[in-house]
Amino acid sequence: MGALKVLVFFGVIVGCLSAKQFPENFLFGAAGASYQIEGGWDADGKGLSMWDVFAHTPGKIKNNDTGDVACDSYNKYKEDVAILKQLGLKVYRFSISWPRILPKGIPTEINQAGVDYYRNLIKELKDAGIEPLVTLYHWDLPQHLAELGGWLNPRIADYFGDYARICFELFGDQVKYWLPLNEPGTTCVHGYETGDLAPGLPLSGEGIYQCAYVHVLAHAKAWHIYNDEFRSKQGGKVGFNNVCFWFYPKSNNSEDIEAQTRAMEFGCGLYANPIYNGDWPQVVIDRVAYRSKKEGYSFSRLPTFTEEEKQYINGTSDYYGLNMYTSYLVEALADESFDSPSLEQDLAYNSTADPSWAHSASEWLNLDPPGIRNVLNYVNEKYNPGEIVVTENGWSDNGELDDQGRVTYLKGYLSNVLDAIVEDSINVIAYTTWSLMDNFEWNQGYTQKFGIVQVDFDSPNRTRTLKSSAEWYKRVAAAKEIVD
Ligand code: GBH
């Protein structure tokens, strides 16, 4: 009897565990971005973007790969949608190429072929019962605007506002989830601090903060335009997006714990705090001011928001679009010199991977599934964003069809998303894995594959083939639970 009770007890426990379910209306989906998948770089009146120019510059991209053809989704979008449908996915995150709609980025000329492309794509999705989640800007800035100073010029926020308004007008009857800007953090660090992504400006210690300032203003402008001119008739949501990785202190000493705070606040917080709390994180304000002074500046390298701007930017997000991939351990470094400004010295930490974490094909990407639950809790507590969508999460390999590494990764991270929902009561409403298809991985070209669907880049047909992870993910989306 006793033994039977014990058995029944464990049976119930195991039953409960295996029955842990995603909410009934939770949306599973996949993501991609215009420059990485579309190709058609000069098709039908599209203007140049700064990524066309950057990728066409010899030496900037591995193997001098470009996005000229990429997955050819400009021509093959119906196949992409058919695959999403076949997998039972209910949300597709894609981005609009600004210069495909406005060839020079300015509202004087609207390229009808570009408008038609996105209208057709959206119609195809809706007909298949798939919700479009649309990023307005995933790094392909019109070259004309890059030449006007790009993300260093505060006027870009006004140009972006005009572009956003045109997109809301053109597509807002069909689109209910918008994200103005993809990962400002990555653009500002890699475009304007290190220079290894477009526009390739190594303006160490300075470009990043001006870029962050302009991104925050641009995001807020798009949100206000939607809020004032479209919300009442279209009823959609405009979210904030950034990449937010998890950092553990390497030891329990106070220096390393402070380094963890710096890591979170200079990464996740630099862009999120202005949007949710109306100003830069205090740690960042203090740290950059301190170092700037020691470096001999009469002002901080971090721009100051005026009171009017603080009011304008505060509270400009309807949901949080979280891009999350990996975790790091951080160890504090002491200030050594003040002779050249840099983000690295502002950060003052060393980051490493725990030896127990598996490593992907990408230098920076490690397997630490609990990291995503930590970040979800962090974001939820700090920014109180209401709804959260995990807008990117994924694993890179060499493109093998039996991609068990990706299955392991997704299983671990999705289990932690589920725990965040069920155990921590965090309101995660959707998850779009990065990415639907293998694609142009920026300065890594086609050397690292993130897709749950393989693309044959050697074939003019760009043949798509489901990987093991796609088959697995299909079963998860159907069961709304983590399956083996
Ligand atoms: C996202 O960035 C992008 O939104 C997406 O377009 C991209 O394809 C996807 O992730 C996969 O990479 O070269 O060691 O300095 C994720 C954040 C920030 C990760 C830049 C890679 C470069 C690391 N990325 N980082 S390193």
Image (tube, rainbow, N blue to C red):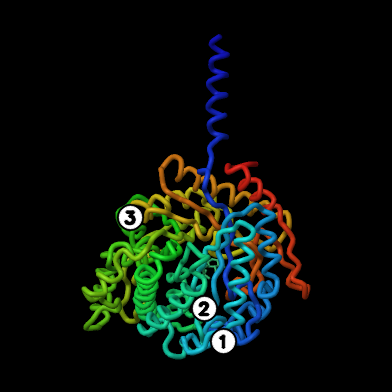
Q: Does the residue labelled 2 lie within 8 Å of ligand 1?
A: yes
The reply to whether residue 134 is visible in this rendering is: yes
C-alpha separation, residue under disc 3 versus residue under disc 1? 39 Å
Q: Is residue 455 above or below residue 468?
A: below
Q: Is mark 2 on a helix, strand or loop?
A: loop
Q: What residue type is labelled 1?
A: Leu
Is 88 or 390 nearer to us in this picture? 88
Task: Give the residue at mark 2.
Answer: 196
- For label 1, the crowd category at 10 Å Cα-Cα, with few meaning under 14, some 14 to 19 and many 20 or more, is many
Q: How far apart are marks 1 and 2 (CA)?
A: 19 Å
Front: mark 3 or 2: 3
Q: Which residue lies furthest to the front in this view?
A: 233
Q: Which residue is labeled 1 in the image?
A: 48
Q: What residue type is labelled 2?
A: Asp
Mark 3 surroundings within 10 Å by alpha-carbon count, few (fewer than 14), some (14 through 19), many (20 or more) = some
Relative to 422, is 40 on the left or the right? right
Q: In this view, does 115 lie to the left or right of 340?
A: right
Image: 346 above or below 14 = below
Q: What residue type is labelled 3?
A: Lys
Residue 95 in picture, x, y percent from top left: 54, 70
- The residue carrying mark 3 is 382
Q: In the image, residue 255 lies at what x, y percent?
A: 31, 58
User: Residue 77 lies in what quarter of the image?
Assistant: bottom right
Q: Is mark 3 within 8 Å of ligand 1?
A: no
Label 1 with label 2: CB-CB less than 8 Å:
no
